[in-house]
Image: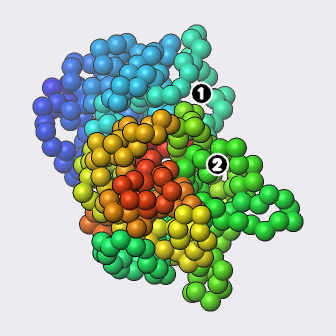
């Protein structure tokens, strides 16, 4: 038992949180794991977290944070649950975890990650081990009254608000693509390139919408491409106006290629684009889900048949398709993929990629499909598991396509959502 500032005791051995009781008394279950003074005003924050089944246990009790004294003084270095180095700071100053708390707390496993990231408090605010930040200068605690506001991340959609196709996507495990239906892939975005003010826009890469402001694509679609100009959403046929769509073109405000991207080996082939304006979601424009749930994040997807879709070339060095095409392809083992590309010295096949395609060839992602999504469905909800990266020609027998494995870059993706 522990006692709060107001004199109310809490049973720290309780294993369930009763949200009805949360409203009636300070929700200190599993929070005070030792005798100590509990900051009473923190109860408001903890009450909401507890009712959402997110409790920063053992870290809101005064003077205690995972065995270290990290109060309002110097910033401490720490290691987060993923093994990444970070610093212990106010959660309001950590965009990655603040975004998880606000937008993803209903996703299984996120609550556990947040609890394990807690490392103390700052006034009444929880502190968390925030990865990827430089250590703050030591010295006097910051003056909250004059603190500059930190940019807040653009939140990922709730798991119930992403990955939904408003038409039935036919399960056709065949070698060969076929036209997509209107609304089948509402997160698919075509990237347009414009070499000069007077030149026509050429759509050369695909991408996938993940928030109201962000799309994910391949690093090679962005690296060194000053001509990258717009993102087109809600499109079906690039050359027709009578296809039932009302696509919108949005300028690209900012771009971020992964710091480790290598244009020779195509390693870390991923980039985030921030659009100039917020997107209004419609039945034809929706975000795809990131594979954040632990049971999806841990899959290798071998022998599954995810979808690809795009406006790429119909065959190697052939004409592009103005109509959006889709197909399903089988994911193959890493061993099979390494064997296929063993004679290519620059092809690096490791845990950052997955490979998919038919052994006999016939159909695959091709030029123009680069950056587009590899999409896997669970319970009628689609998740972004891969990004079209590279291959040998197109649909060449014995050579699967290589895709950036999104689950290997989830922390990086969420850290870019500003």
Closer to viewer: mark 2 or mark 1: 2
Q: Would you name the residue on which mark 1 appears?
A: 144
Q: Is residue 249 left or right of residue 392?
A: right
Q: Would you name the residue on which mark 2 appears?
A: 222
Task: Give the camera-side residue of 3 and 265.
Answer: 265
| Quarter of the image that includes the C terminus | top right
Locate residue 257, reporting x and y percent. Answer: 60, 41
Locate residue 68, reporting x and y percent. Answer: 34, 13
What is the secondary structure assignment of the residue under circle 2? loop
Q: CA distance from mark 2 to mark 1?
A: 39 Å
In the image, which disc is placed on residue 331? Answer: none
What is the secondary structure assignment of the residue under circle 1? helix
The residue drawn where x is 42% and y is 54% is 401
Task: Give the camera-side residue of 83 and 27.
Answer: 83
The answer to whether any part of residue 158 appears in the image is no
Locate residue 52, reporting x and y percent. Answer: 30, 48
Sequence-wise, which precedes: disc 2 or disc 1?
1
Q: Considering only vertical position in the picture, is 376 above or below 217?
A: below
The residue drawn where x is 43% and y is 50% is 402
Q: Is residue 9 left or right of residue 370?
A: left
Task: Give the camera-side residue of 299 and 176.
Answer: 176
Q: Is residue 211 left or right of residue 113?
A: right
The residue drawn where x is 62% and y is 43% is 256
| Quarter of the image that includes the N terminus | top left
């Amino acid at each position: 038992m522990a006692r709060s500032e107001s004199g109310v005791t809490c049973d720290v051995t309780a294993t369930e949180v009763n949200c009805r009781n949360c409203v009636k008394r300070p929700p200190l279950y599993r929070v005070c794991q030792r005798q100590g003074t509990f900051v009473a005003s923190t109860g408001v924050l903890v009450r909401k977290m507890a009712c959402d089944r997110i409790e920063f246990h053992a870290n809101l009790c005064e003077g205690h944070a995972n065995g270290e004294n990290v109060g309002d003084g110097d910033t401490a270095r720490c290691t987060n649950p993923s093994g990444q180095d970070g610093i212990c700071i106010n959660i309001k100053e950590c965009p990655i975890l603040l975004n998880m708390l606000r937008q993803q707390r209903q996703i299984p496993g996120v609550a556990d990650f947040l609890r394990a990231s807690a490392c103390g408090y700052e006034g009444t605010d929880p502190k968390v081990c925030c990865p990827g930040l430089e250590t703050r200068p030591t010295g006097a605690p910051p003056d909250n009254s004059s603190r500059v506001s930190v940019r807040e991340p653009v939140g990922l959609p709730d798991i119930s608000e992403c990955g939904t196709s408003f038409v039935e996507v036919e399960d056709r495990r065949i070698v060969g693509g076929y036209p997509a239906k209107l609304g089948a892939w509402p997160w698919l975005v075509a990237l347009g390139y414009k070499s000069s003010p007077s030149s026509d826009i050429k759509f050369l890469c695909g991408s996938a919408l993940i928030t109201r402001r962000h799309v994910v694509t391949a690093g090679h679609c962005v690296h060194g491409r000053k001509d990258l100009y717009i993102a087109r959403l809600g499109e079906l046929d690039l050359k027709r106006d009578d296809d039932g769509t009302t696509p919108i073109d949005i300028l690209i405000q900012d771009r971020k290629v992964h710091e480790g991207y290598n244009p020779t080996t195509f390693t870390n082939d991923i980039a985030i684009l921030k659009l100039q304006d917020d997107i209004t979601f419609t039945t034809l424009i929706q975000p795809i889900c990131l594979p954040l749930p632990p049971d999806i994040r841990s899959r290798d997807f071998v022998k599954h048949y995810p979808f690809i879709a795009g406006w790429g070339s119909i065959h190697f060095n052939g004409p592009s398709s103005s109509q959006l095409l889709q197909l399903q392809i089988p994911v193959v083992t890493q061993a099979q993929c390494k064997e296929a590309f063993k004679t290519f010295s620059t092809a690096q096949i490791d845990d950052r990629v997955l490979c998919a395609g038919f052994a006999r060839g016939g159909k695959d992602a091709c030029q123009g499909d680069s950056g587009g999504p590899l999409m896997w469905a669970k319970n009628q909800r689609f998740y972004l598991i891969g990004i079209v990266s590279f291959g040998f020609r197109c649909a060449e027998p014995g050579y699967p396509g290589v895709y950036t494995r999104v689950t290997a870059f989830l922390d990086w993706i969420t850290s870019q959502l500003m």
